[in-house]
Amino acid sequence: IGLYRTIFYLPTLVPPIAATIVFTLLFSPLGGPINTILSWVGIQAPDWLNDPNWAMPALIMLGIWPLGVETLAFVAGLKEIPQDLLDAAAVDGAQGWQRLRHVIIPLITPVILFNLVIGVIYSFQVFTQALVIGGQNGEPLESTLVFLVLIYRNAFRYFSMGYAAALSVILFAVVLLLTLLIFRTARSWVHYEGGQL
């Protein structure tokens, strides 16, 4: 299991610019391995990074790249589940899916909460990948124009610092409200060994 943890965590260590460049090479329409494999299977490969319909899905796939931290958190949470509880559930006649639903998932809800909060915050911080793939204009046709690139463009291209600062405050407010909403709803579904949140 140590090898798998290492494999899942390694992409997290790669700088975002390097990961984005490797990603663009993998999805290149000019002999990229992904399009080559799709053509072998008989699927017409899209122009991932130049087609407005596929550029944002490609950027989202790139966002999945650094899931190592979340994976390690889940592994740590699973290791903390007391074996006695799993054995007791088995003695009570719980099958695999029942143990997963009634024992394992309730015990790792704090880890799910952590990963959810980190994931929401991270999703609003996508900048480097979008800037490398789509530039300041969010090419093609502003399909990769994410909020942070919009802030960057207003601040350093149009030199509208006040507008960029206002956008930053709005971004902060949205992330704060979403995080508070997650914590508020977590009271009903996050379970700790000593009780609920």
Image (cartoon, rainbow, N blue to C red):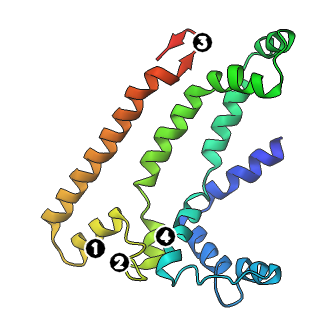
Vertical comparison of 16 with 2: above or below: below
**Of the residues shown, which amino acid type is indicated by label 1?**
Arg
Whichever of callouts 1 and 3 sits on the residue coming sooner in the sequence is 1
Whichever of callouts 3 and 4 sits on the residue coming sooner in the sequence is 4
One can see residue 15 in this view:
no
Binning the other alpha carbons within 10 Å of mark 2 as few (below 14), some (14 to 19) or many (20 upward) gives many
Relative placement, left or right, of 18 versus 186 is right
Whichever of callouts 1 and 2 sits on the residue coming sooner in the sequence is 2
Vertical comparison of 86 with 156: above or below: above
Front label number (1 vs 3): 3
Tell me whether circle 1 and circle 2 mark residues in contact (CB < 8 Å): yes
Tell me whether circle 4 and circle 1 mark residues in contact (CB < 8 Å): no
Q: Could you say whether the residue bearing mark 4 is in a helix, strand or loop?
A: helix
Q: Position of residue 33 (x, y in %)?
A: 74, 79
Q: Could you say whether the residue bearing mark 2 is in a helix, strand or loop?
A: loop
Residue under label 3: 193
Q: Position of residue 140 (x, y in %)?
A: 43, 83
Vertical comparison of 109 with 149: above or below: above
Identified at 13% across, 63% down, the residue is 162
Front label number (3 vs 2): 3
Task: Say which mark, if any, is on residue 88.
Answer: none
Residue under label 1: 153
Q: Give the Cα distance between marks 3 and 4.
A: 41 Å
Relative placement, left or right, of 79 versus 134 is right
Residue under label 4: 56
Q: Nearer the viewer, residue 152 or 101?
A: 101
Residue under label 2: 136
Front label number (2 vs 4): 4
